[in-house]
Image (cartoon, rainbow, N blue to C red):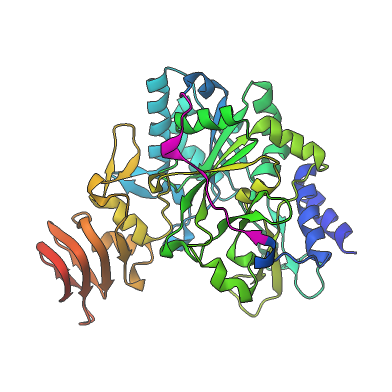
Amino acid sequence: DMWPKFEEKMKKDDMNETAMAAFKYTYGVLVSGADVMIPESKLDPVESLMEYEKLKEKPDPRLLKKTLILKLNGGLGTGMGLDKAKSLLEVTGGLTFLDLIAKQVASMKKEFKTDLKFMLMNSFSTSKDTLEALSKYPELGTGSDLEFVQNKAPKVTASDMSPAEWPAQPDHEWCPPGHGDLYPAMLGSGTLEKLLKKGYRYMFVSNSDNLGATMDLKILSHFVQSGAPFMMEVAERTDADKKGGHLAKDKATGGLLLRESAQCPEEDEKEFQNVGKYKFFNTNNLWVDLVALKREFRRNDGALPLPVMKNAKTVDPRDKKSTAVLQLETAMGAAIQCFQGASALVIPRSRFAPVKTTNDLLALRSDAYTLTEDFTIVLAAERQGVPPDVKLDGMYKFFDAMEKMIPNGAPSLVGCKKLVVEGEITFAKDVVIKGTVTIKNSSGSCKEVPAGTYEDCTKEL
């Protein structure tokens, strides 16, 4: 039994009881050999759900006083070549994700003439930069009133299930435990207790890179009046979403659950991707009753029984010959199966505008999106809810390369269905893209796309 070695390692690192209990639970699932897969035979599709447009509840602004807005902000922008918090990337008009979030909160405080509680879950690697960036908005809060920091988890040696060791860089022995860590991090940091003592009852959680996830009084009022302990905002899956997780019903209990691709057996891959059968995906906009959350912790001896996902990696991610390890993760949306009576709400796609790549960022900086008075970024009306599909050349994976491509700002994409860029280019001022356009430069040196309108064509430079 390797557990004592993990316990010793975590104690040496001053980890709190809740963080240790959470890891003990996920590690227990791993070594028990329990099947973490969710086969087709255990599921029923979700046929119909309540829709945002059909909500009848009267919005109640008094609920805002009891509600926390929480943004998950633990991710670095490494995928886009940024070595600090991803939320520090500039989105539009010189404003970063964090600027926009801070201004959204300020705008709501003004609109409803009420105080609004806002917090971030940072990671060790994002905390310092983020607090610095938000110091110009002192009204949001400071220090432990503004943030709590997510835990880290030991990596597990794949061959014998022992704690991974890498003396050359001991940092590599630890990994983030996935955003399911939100719950133990809230409990272990004392944040949950502090919020309940101050009279907060409800929490709206979303990713800091999803600019569509703003506090919505209509949804909050529906959530509270429904009495559900937990509610997930879901959107309708299209072909573009078929590789991502989906909502389903547990055949045995009838309750809602999430199935991620890592939990789908290979032989069920086709059904997993069947968007006609499994119609909804999790946007990671979640509503949680904090009293119910505390109750679940109590009922489960201090650790929520979230499904565990195993990721096979090497201890040094850059060195493929280094020790093979397993990283154990949980997802916060998966808590939907821990709460009896949990519900889901189908929301318009406008509440789901995440920025995962420079393709997304280029679209956001274009006129396909507009910035509203309350600092929300929405798709232009004429897009009818469908974002442009942008595919940039691999050389534009990092944001600084993408910025060199648009020295005069992004081209007009409001009428663009799909834009493909192959080769090294820059856009002149006043380039308008309409329909489906491919721009190619195979010369090997950078070329400019001249001003003008390009519609349903392939442009060779």
Q: Nearer the viewer, residue 193 or 297?
A: 297
Residue 214, given in percent of the width and then of the height, sits at 43, 37
Vertical order, 52 against 209 (above or below): above
Q: Nearer the viewer, residue 336 or 49?
A: 49
Q: Which residues are magenta?
A: 43-58
Residue 448 falls left or right of residue 299: left
Vertical order, 265 against 183 (above or below): below
Instruction: Assess whether residue 45 is covered by the magenta stretch.
Output: yes
Residue 300, given in percent of the width and then of the height, sits at 81, 43
> Which quadrant, please, contains the C terminus?
bottom left
Residue 80, given in percent of the width and then of the height, sits at 42, 61
Quadrant hosting residue 424: bottom left
Vertical order, 317 against 50 (above or below): below
- Any part of residue 434 in sight: yes
Q: Residue furthest left?
A: 452
Residue 283 falls left or right of residue 400: right
